[in-house]
Amino acid sequence: MKKLMTGNEAIARGAYEAGVKYASAYPGTPSTEILENIATYKDSIVAEWAPNEKVALEAAIGGSIAGARTIASMKHVGLNVAADPLFTFAYTGVNGGMILVSADEPGMHSSQNEQDNRNYAKFAKIALFEPSNSQEAKDMIKEAYRVSEEFDTPVLYRVTTRLCHSKGIVECSDRVEVGIKDYVKNPQKTLTVPAHARVLRHSVEERLEKLEEYSNNTSLNYCEMNDSKVGVIASGMCYMFAKEVFKNDASYMKLGFTNPLPIERIKEFASNVEKIYVIEENDPFIEDQLKAAGIDCIGKDLFPKMGEMTPDVLRKAVFGKTNDTIKYNKELVVPRPPGLCAGCPHRGFFYELGKRKNVLVSGDIGCYTLGFAPPYNAMDTVVCMGASLSAGHGAQKVFNMKKDNEMRVVGVLGDSTFFHTGINSLLDVVYNKGNSISVILDNRITGMTGHQQNPGTGYTLQGEVTEIVDIEGLVRACGVKQVRTIDPNNLKEVKETLDWAFELDEPSVIITRWPCVLKRFSKEDIEEFNNPFTNKCDIDKDACIGCKICMKTGCPAISFDKDEKKVNIDKNQCVGCNVCSQVCPKDAISNNGLAKEVK
């Protein structure tokens, strides 16, 4: 059976065919669709969203110890969160095979950095696989489980954005059921007190020697001999990019298993070509090891140190030119930066917060990060998931050291991010007697990555009804006494609540609670929020004076007609959130007859 699949879909299919029993992840681009697709195999695999990547990996580790084949997936920065259990699991090894998928993002399409997670495999001393197309993405999963169990190692399965989201024809097979291995108590292997870990440390080195022998003999690493003048060494998508550029005018050393590297095979390849290009994205992971082994090669001294090594990038680096493309006047292209959707429940909050003076807004990872942009200009820092509240706490502590300090700090994060690592950050604020303001933007879903369930939604990944974590109750359990939950579309309520929080000299939390406009509403959403987004706003052109104040809300449904000098509302985008009507000084905007809030 053949299917057209993205790399993420193929990885999921590979896990299914390989007999995986348990899967866990936290959503993050470009990895999100891996677990979403694994979840469709309900009869064979238990698939779960975890609150964060560390928990996801720990759950997969537990399943492996219990004897099942398991998988955890995450984006590259998620592995930073999960590094703690990974390094220890590298010592203990597996029972059932365990794969950790790291979806790296050269070019930072939707990430705050472009770290190269191949380094984690070398650092943790574990096996590393790198598929280069959808078919390999599926097939290598099976081999990775075999290697995991034969060599007693977790496997890092490194993919990149291009592979995750590009499509290819995949030959599918039936699932091969793999039984759950017996669990035998063995604290010397699974309980890493120092006395046990010192012994396991030696076994890690012994395992690496065996894996290097495997690397030099596996068919995952192979040569394609063509022209002897130029040789290309590449792995993952870089191999595909190189093939498109050099075609049959170069020979190739194609690497699918890259830690440990097959140094002996590479030396043999190098002896048969005059010049070697090492093509890899981000770090000189392969290049540095080749040069250390005495293999002369050209790498980052020619190719860019950052971004994707797409065919055009390679052509320009090697040949000094790119393919001809359609020429156009770039000055006519209108820049379209990302913005909050029409009806976004974060709009009203950022509209009011952006008016405040002497404020540092400590931001976080999510749709709401767009609060930094005009017209709100209401976010100053972003570090990583959950850092808004803790970084904000540290900033407020330092500001407070200054005499006559007037600076206040507002930490802002979403509901899913709060569950991810924001709870710990809030505990830091409370425990250390901070006075920063913490805001949880609860839009009832994990928004930025495509609407995944989380502990606050009431549903699991595979659609089961579950307990809803009450955010306000959890905040109070953390020790916060000053808590308010508000409707962010009600600007009067937002303003009054911010006034209240700014007057306090102790930890406070504001929870804005309204569903994402793009969310598929549950019956609970419809009941709680009275079937939201079912009206549209209208402009009374006679009353409109063209002051453009409504445009300062940043709603993409609102535009200004320069000839008419009046505002228009696009009915195809408007969902009647009513924020614009509240700021209009002439009451020129109505919401299908609904009463407007007091300005």
Image (tube, rainbow, N blue to C red):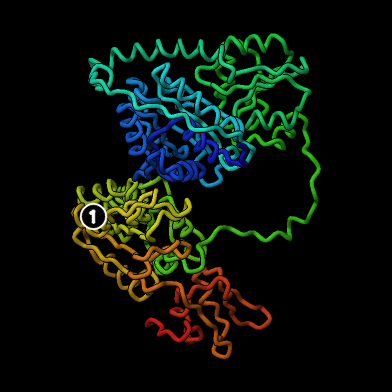
In the rendered image, the vertical position of residue 87 relative to residue 353, given as above or below: above
Residue at the outermost bottom position: 542
The quarter of the picture where the N terminus appears is: top right
Per the image, the residue denoted by label 1 is 474
Query: Is there any visible trace of residue 263 in the rendered image?
Result: yes
**Residue nearer the viewer, 63 or 569:** 63
Name the quadrant containing residue 267: top right
Write the residue at 78% across / 30% down. Answer: 319
- Residue 32 percent coordinates (x, y): 48, 44
Write the residue at 46% across / 65% down. Answer: 517
Query: Is there any visible trace of residue 112 in the rendered image?
Result: no
- Residue 313 percent coordinates (x, y): 69, 36
In the rendered image, the vertical position of residue 84 relative to residue 257, given as above or below: below
- Say which element carries label 1: helix
Badge 1 amino acid: Leu
Residue 374 is left or right of residue 326, and the answer is: left
